[in-house]
Image: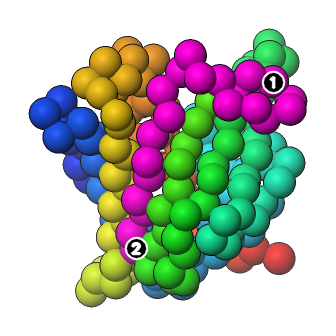
Amino acid sequence: MPVTDVQHDLEALTLTITADFAAPVERVWEVYADPRQLERVWGPPTHPATFVDHELAPGGRMNYYLTTPEGEKYYAYWDIDTVDRPDGFTFRDGFALDETFAANTAMPESRQHYTFTATDAGTRATYVSSYATADALQTVLAMGVVEGASSAINQIDDLVSAHVG
């Protein structure tokens, strides 16, 4: 499995997930740069993602929803802050109210810092989520963010090893 480490730190208000992929950095980057590829791995396998908007550029916005097996949709967004292709990007990640993708301010928003570093075996990806408060971090931990994110990230291996047409 690609996920090799998961750490949460209530004092630093962070959740860090580390994963190793047997693919070059540029190939891992392409997963995030292409909305159709990202849809294949974003969200747990039972909750596929649909990206409605996808602009991986500073100031860009990525709106998406996850669909449950029962057909219920959960809306969310990424507001892109920085992009350093292919080494990583930063963004604000939040829950949305509905298909308008307006922020759901009752739910925690996080700052995300994704980095992709070349290794002898391929790429090490480090996903750092920062929260404003310990309560916000506790909320997403209780919602199952570690399990959900890990199962999503673990899907990347099959995608990067397959030929994408």
3D distance between C-alphas at marks 2 and 1 = 32 Å
Q: Position of residue 41 (x, y in %)?
A: 63, 50
Task: Please indicate, yes or no, whether residue 46 appears anywhere in the rendered image.
Answer: no
Residue drawn at x 39%, y 69% is 115
Mark 2 in CB contact with mark 1 (< 8 angstroms): no
Residue drawn at x 44%, y 52% is 112
Task: Name the element at disc 2.
Answer: strand
**Circle nearer the viewer, 2 or 1:** 1
Displayed quadrant of residue 119: bottom left
Indicate yes or no whether the magenta region holds residue 105.
yes
First to last magenta residue range: 96-116
Displayed quadrant of residue 54: bottom right
Q: In the visual, does 41 lie left or right of 60?
A: left
Examine the rendered structure and indicate whether residue 134 appears above or below residue 20.
Answer: above
Examine the rendered structure and indicate whether residue 75 appears above or below residue 7.
Answer: above
Question: Which residue is labeled 2 in the image?
Answer: 116
Q: Position of residue 106 (x, y in %)?
A: 56, 16
Residue drawn at x 59%, y 23% is 105
Task: Please indicate, yes or no, whether residue 20 appears anywhere in the rendered image.
Answer: yes
Examine the rendered structure and indicate whether residue 50 appears above or below residue 104.
Answer: below
CA neighbours of label 2 inside 10 A, class few (<14), some (14 to 19), many (20+): many
Question: Which residue is labeled 1 in the image?
Answer: 98
Task: Name the element at disc 1.
Answer: loop
Mark identifier at residue 59: none
Indicate yes or no whether the magenta region holds residue 62.
no
Looking at the rendered structure, the kind of residue marked 2 is: Phe
Chain-order first, disc 2 or disc 1: 1
Residue drawn at x 48%, y 62% is 90
| Closer to us: 100 or 45 | 100
The overriding secondary structure of the stretch rendered in magenta is: loop
Looking at the rendered structure, the kind of residue marked 1 is: Asp
